[in-house]
Image (spheres, rainbow, N blue to C red):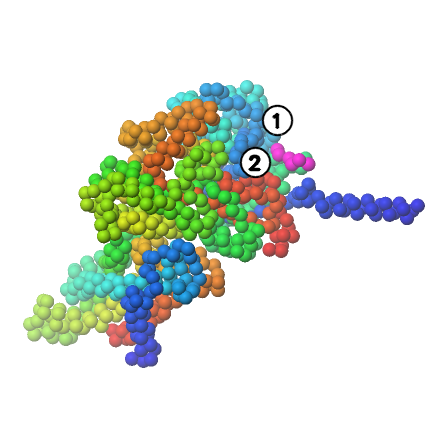
Amino acid sequence: MNAARKLACVVVLAVCAVSLAANWLAPAGYAKQFREAPSAPPSRQHLLGTDEVGRDRFARVLYGTRISLLLAPAAALVSTALAALIGGLAGYLGGIWLRLARGFTDLFLSLPWLFLLIAVRALLPLNTSPLVSVLITFLILGLLGWAASARVLSTSADALRNSDFVLQARASGLHGPRLFFVHVLPNLKPVLYAQFWISIPVFILAEANLGILGLGVAEPLPSWGSLLRELEGMISFREEWWRLAPLLLLIVVMTSFQTLLSNEEVTA
Amino acid sequence: MNYRRAFLRLLAGYALLFLILTSGSAFAQNGGELRFCLRSEPKTFDPLLVDDDSSLSIRYLTGGVLVRVNRHTQDLEPELAESWKVSQDGKQITFKLRRGISFSDGTQFFADDVAFTMQRLMDPALHSSTGDAFRSGSGAVSTKIIAPDQISVTFPAPLAGLDRLFDQVAIMSARSPKKEAAVLGPFMVAEYKAGSSVLLRRNPNYWKKDSHGRRLPYLDSIRLDIQPNRDVEMLRFKRGELDLINVIDSDYFDRLAATSPQLAHDAGPSLDSDFMWFNQVASAPIPEYKRAWFRSTNFRRAISQAINRDDLSRVVFNGHAQPAVGPVSPANKFWFNSRLKAEPYRPDAARQRLQADGFHLQNGALFDKEGNPVEFSIVTNAGNKPRERMAVMVQEDLGKLGIKVNVVTLDFPSLIERISQKFNYEAAMLGFRNVDLDPNGQMNIWLSSAEDHAWNPQQKSPETAWEAEIDRLMRAQASTADPKKRKESFDRVQEIVAEQAPFIYLVNQNALSAVSSAVEGANPGILSPQTFWNAERLTLNASARASR
């Protein structure tokens, strides 16, 4: 692991650790409204100032980071598992299964995913608590985000199916699930890891996109999406530089993920 | 002697120069192009089909009307009609027209143009929303030309506030081959580039003159750039590329006021209001116990009392809003019921009301008499930041009573589908953009049979006594031409709404606008169009514009 990747790893771990310690580090709850001081600049009481309704911005960044950083990997896990199931199995089975799976994947990829997300989000029950809404949002992201990974996995599994060692295993009488789990799946692991790591920043950004549209995590729970949305209409960066904190954090974390990811892709 | 004569000539010359230099107000500077933005593409240039803000702005600037509501005094003033008279039964109006007026293409203006306009406006095939306001009952609208400068229009049933409705009717020419392009207003459409701009040039035949006999308007032209992005609009205004912004948000307003206070104008409370309401529809897919809460006056009043409207005005709108009193803003000088006051923030009174209905606190959470936890969702439209902030503040205010509120933002089509078709919601927060001073414009909201009776629409017969009373009062005010009787009826409607709180009114936003120092004569008001309602008398100061 080179220095850049080590640094990226340290940054991601540090951000995760700090966000997990939000309960102790934040001076106030993320929902507490200091109505006498809305849109306040940084002070000793509010390190990053307050938002438009007087909520401590530092607390919201910490809690928002926790939500986005914990749930994006969870969504990535769901989507990678689905991709492995659909793409991996189809590639392994080949023939009509592979053609069917690819057709279905292509159909899914051709759907305008943002509109699909908005439509699915609108169909959800209204009376869900903010915590449930955040789980649902990321679950939807996971359930809808498997197609690209499935395509890659089906191609890899198809290549493995026709590889010499699988043919040899088949010739020696190995079939069905045992052949899949003993010979195919272990060789798909690098691709699965790569797809998992690639999906995390994609889901973080997808949630941010939904948040910018006002359709992400429900108030008063913060997320990177809702925090980034506060930058809308910001004209002067010099006068309110502290409001850029969530954006800087997103850039740092995404860059770190990409740096880590390059290693995984090489391995894959 | 020669010296003396030369001295006197020099003195006279200086005096003349002094007069010219100091008489700016008397001889307003002609010419120049005023520039501002439309926030969407105008859907039509046909004045009778106008149904959107951009087309409305163009109609205001180009259309000639018989009477005009003065946007500053709110009084009705003569325009193309010298005088008018409404019959006692409220069914007929007779106009005496000005003579010697021409359309922009030179065609003469007579009473038959008014008859043509009214016949076209009331043609059911045209589907004119302006015409809908004149539909008072079954039967045709008839016009009678009494003389070339006199016409009467008769309606099948009485129309309350009949004369004011003509503020929206731009007269079209019956004879001009240019059809709607021939106008009687101060400007005419000269160029339209789809998606880019609309250029209006001064109407050379405009009939109005200033007190010095000079033909209005002073401006040569108005360029309306089509720009939906408000950030870009504000940046262009700051750069001096635009001369005015008709309506701006409180955030932008404060930023502008911080750097250029002379350009930011706060005209006080507007007619617009933000409010929330509970779903009381009998067939709505919500639990029966929640419907029982929402149908309880005590519950609704308690929610109203637990909301801190002063905080909403101060925090969300930076003080550029007032706690709302009811369906009529205090800005509506005639129709506002001045006996009413905004519901004060009284959480203790709210708790008492809830206790009276059997609600009780348990470990900080509120439960109803059957033991159900009090929790409901408020839906509002995604993307409207002030409204989302208000919802979050209401969430916290009600949390202090032990009520759990879930704020749900939805894209607008989904929201409308839920609140008007499927009724699959519990509470909603929206705004009402009121452009009509007259309560007749709100008939579609207050009648229990109406589609827009948001909390429980399209009732076959009024489900509550107070809704029946509102129906009766609204019909009573609509069926008489006597302003005093109408006011009494509508005052009572406002009182019932305050007592029953079917809508929980939150704030009336202030009318905020931005006007460049280069624009002279602007007097921003609360009625639309806020900044250019007197466009014909606006002038541009070239030196002030150059210095921006």
Position of the C terminus of chain A, as image quadrant, is bottom left
Image coordinates of residue B300 in percent, x first then y, are 31, 40
Viewer-side residue, B232 vs B324: B324
Provide the residue designation for mark 1: B99
Q: Is residue B418 visible?
A: no
Q: Is residue B420 left or right of residue B481?
A: left
Provide the residue designation for mark 2: B185
Protein chain holding label 2: B
Position of the N terminus of chain A, as image quadrant, is bottom left
Task: State the separation of the CA atoms marked 1 and 2.
Answer: 15 Å
Amino acid bearing label 1? Arg
Q: Secondary structure at mark 2?
A: loop
Task: State yes or no: residue B211 in magenta.
Answer: yes
Viewer-side residue, A127 vs A72: A127
Give the residues in magenta: B207-212
10 Å neighbourhood of mark 1: few (<14), some, or many (≥20)? some
Q: Residue furthest left?
A: A173
Amino acid bearing label 2? Gly
Which residue appears at 36% of the width and 56% of the height? Answer: A33
Viewer-side residue, B468 vs B94: B468
Task: State yes or no: residue B192 in magenta.
Answer: no
Which residue appears at 50% of the width and 23% of the height? Answer: B86
